[in-house]
Image (spheres, rainbow, N blue to C red):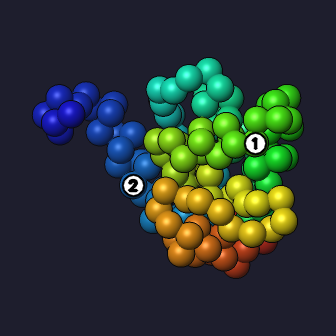
Amino acid sequence: IYLSELSLSDTNVLSETSNKLVKYFTGNLQDFNVPIKVKGTSFEISAWRALLRIPYGETWSYFKQANFINKPKAIRAIGNANSKNPLPIIIPCHRVIGKDGSLRGFSGGIEKKTYLIELEKKFKHVHMN
């Protein structure tokens, strides 16, 4: 997509999202309330919707995420869906960890996942949305 093909409302959303990302990384935003439209299978969409329910500064296991969508045996499928998340951070797949508390896969790498989890822990009790 070329910038010239974007409508004014699209560019407003991009600008708003960019501003919100800056606020997120400085600890001044905990909830992205921006319109999003993603494409995926019905399973992927349900997995990504579950990610949006994980509170800022908290983590769920892949098992808990699978149970949340009533697919308790779909743990590997949850991991696969999370790996296809088109909007990491906004759809916070970094908040999903192994059942034993270990950090597992993240499209941006484990170092970035660790950074995001620690960032959120640091600012968890700051309520500045």
- On the image, the x and y values in percent for residue 96 come to 71, 56
Lateral position of residue 21 relative to residue 5, left or right: right
- On the image, the x and y values in percent for residue 110 come to 56, 70
Q: CA distance from mark 2 to mark 1?
A: 32 Å
The answer to whether any part of residue 50 appears in the image is: yes
Vertical arrangement, residue 10 with respect to residue 15, above or below: above
Lateral position of residue 96 relative to residue 42, left or right: right
Q: Which residue is mark 2?
A: 18
- On the image, the x and y values in percent for residue 32 come to 58, 49
| Residue in the picture at 21% in, 33% down | 1
| Residue in the picture at 61% in, 73% down | 114
Observer-side mark, 2 or 1, equals 1
Q: Earlier in the sequence, mark 2 or mark 1?
A: 2
| Residue in the picture at 35% in, 44% down | 14
Q: Tell me the quadrant of the picture where the C terminus can be found.
A: bottom right
Pointer 1 local density, CA inside 10 Å: few below 14, some 14–19, many at least 20: some
Pointer 2 local density, CA inside 10 Å: few below 14, some 14–19, many at least 20: few
Q: Which residue is mark 1?
A: 75
| Residue in the picture at 76% in, 60% down | 98
Vertical arrangement, residue 104 with respect to residue 77, above or below: below
Q: Amino acid at mark 1?
A: Ile
Foreground pick, 106 / 89:
106
Q: Splitting the image into 4 quarters, where does residue 101 fall?
A: bottom right
Element type at marker 1?
helix
- On the image, the x and y values in percent for residue 23 come to 51, 65
Foreground pick, 124 / 76:
76
